[in-house]
Amino acid sequence: MPALEELTDALLECLREVSDLLDQGITIADAQREALIASDAEKIAVTCTSYQEILRRLAQTDERAAAIAARIADENGIEGEVDVESVADTVDSSFSPLISAELVRISALAVRLREANDINSTLLSNGLDIITTCLRIVANDPEPTVYSSQASMAGSSVNILSLDSRV
């Protein structure tokens, strides 16, 4: 079984990785906000995929940190519910301030990420409301359009979607 110091070092490394992933998540959320504002569908898709990967890696790292914290708790004879915060108080005094500082950093980054996600969620919701409103307007238009159920009855045989009048 690894020494307690090695476990504590591994826990600290996991916490640093969580911080780095949260920081990357903030960067991606900012890029996603810019893409939403610019209505850049391709960039929105790319940022969504990147963000999903960050969330997957965050979950894995968090599970790893929880497992290491549980092993540290076992080594120290701590029973019951164990989390990283409670383990931080029981580790070697040289690691305790480092772990505590990383936990504070994680908390601050998580708040920033949550705020960025709230902004993006609002932007996305507003965009969907606009699309819904446009579709309602088109659906209620008494004249046949390419979007209505009577599209085939439109007065011209010209393809309405084409910019080329020869079609």
Image (cartoon, rainbow, N blue to C red):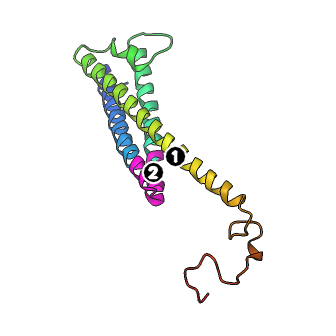
Classed neighbour count for the residue bearing mark 2: other residues with Cα under 10 Å, few (<14), some (14–19), many (≥20): some
Considering every residue shown, the one lying at the far front of the view is 142
- Residue sitting at 31 percent across and 15 percent down? 91
Direction from residue 69 to residue 141 in the image, left or right: right
**First reached walking from the N terminus: tag 2 or tag 1:** 2
Q: Are marks 2 and 1 in contact (CB under 8 Å)?
A: yes
Asked whether 52 or 68 is in front, the reply is 52
**In this picture, which residue range is highlighted in magenta?**
32-52
Direction from residue 74 to residue 145 in the image, left or right: right
Residue 59 placement (x, y as % from top left): 47, 36
Asked whether 3 or 53 is in front, the reply is 53
Asked whether 90 or 117 is in front, the reply is 117
- Residue sitting at 76 percent across and 75 percent down? 152
Residue 82 placement (x, y as % from top left): 46, 16
Amino acid bearing label 1 = Leu
Residue 142 occupies quadrant: bottom right
| Quadrant containing the N terminus in the rendered view | top left
Residue 36 is one of the magenta-drawn residues: yes
What residue is shown with label 1?
Answer: 124
Compared with 101, 42 (above or below) is: below
Residue 159 is one of the magenta-drawn residues: no
Q: Secondary structure at mark 1?
A: helix
What residue is shown with label 2?
Answer: 36
